[in-house]
Structure formats: structure tokens, C-alpha cells
Image (cartoon, grey):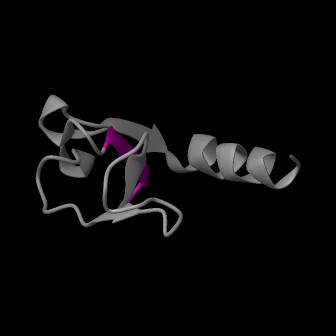
Amino acid sequence: MTESQDSTSFQLTWHRSSYSADTGGNCVEVADLPCGAAVRDSKHPEAGHLPFPAAEWASFLFSTLLR
């Protein structure tokens, strides 16, 4: 990831699954990045996020369709 693609240089918009209840639960949130996606723990958003390059994120999403 280059400095211009650093996910901290712009505001991320986080999305949670519609299957998640507002009362908590084990959930992650996902945000779009120009070069992929970021994932964070919804219970501990202050802990930061993990950025995934577009190819890795696409591969993950494809593998979920096969299950």
C-alpha cells in the first residue's frame, strides 16, 4: 500500500450486516477502500482495522459464495 492509498488519510464509512442486531453480538464492520476493503471489530472499533487489497477481498467474497 502506498502512502497515497493509506486508509487513514480519508474518512471511512463503515457498514454492518443487516443480520446483526443492535444489541451487540459478534460482528465485524466493513468499509470500502480505493484499493480494497477494511474490516474492524464492531465491539472495539478503537482497536483499528485490517486493510485488505482488492484481489484478496474479492477472493474472500467469492469463497463465501461457494459455502
Q: Hey, which quadrant is residue 26 in on the image?
A: top left
- The residue positioned 58% from the left and 47% from the top of the image is 57
Q: Looking at the image, which residue is at 88% across and 49% down?
A: 66
Where residue 4 sits in the image (x, y, percent)?
20, 50
Asked whether 13 falls inside the magenta stretch, the response is no
**Residue 50, position as x, y percentages in the image:** 35, 34
Q: Nearer the viewer, residue 29 or 23?
A: 23
**Residue at left offset 81%, top offset 55%:** 65
- Tell me which secondary structure the magenta stretch mostly adopts: strand
Determine the residue positioned at 60% across, 40% down. 56
**Numbered range of the magenta stretch:** 34-41
> Above or below — where is 16 with respect to 58?
below
Numbered label tally: 0
Q: Position of residue 64 (x, y in %)?
A: 75, 48
33 left or right of 12? right
Residue found at the far top of this picture:
47
* Side of 53 where 11 appears, left or right: left
Residue furthest to the right in view is 66
Q: Quadrant of the N terminus?
A: top left
Quadrant of residue 35 within the rendered picture: bottom left
Closest to the observer: 64 or 27?
27
- Percent across and percent down for residue 44 are 20, 35
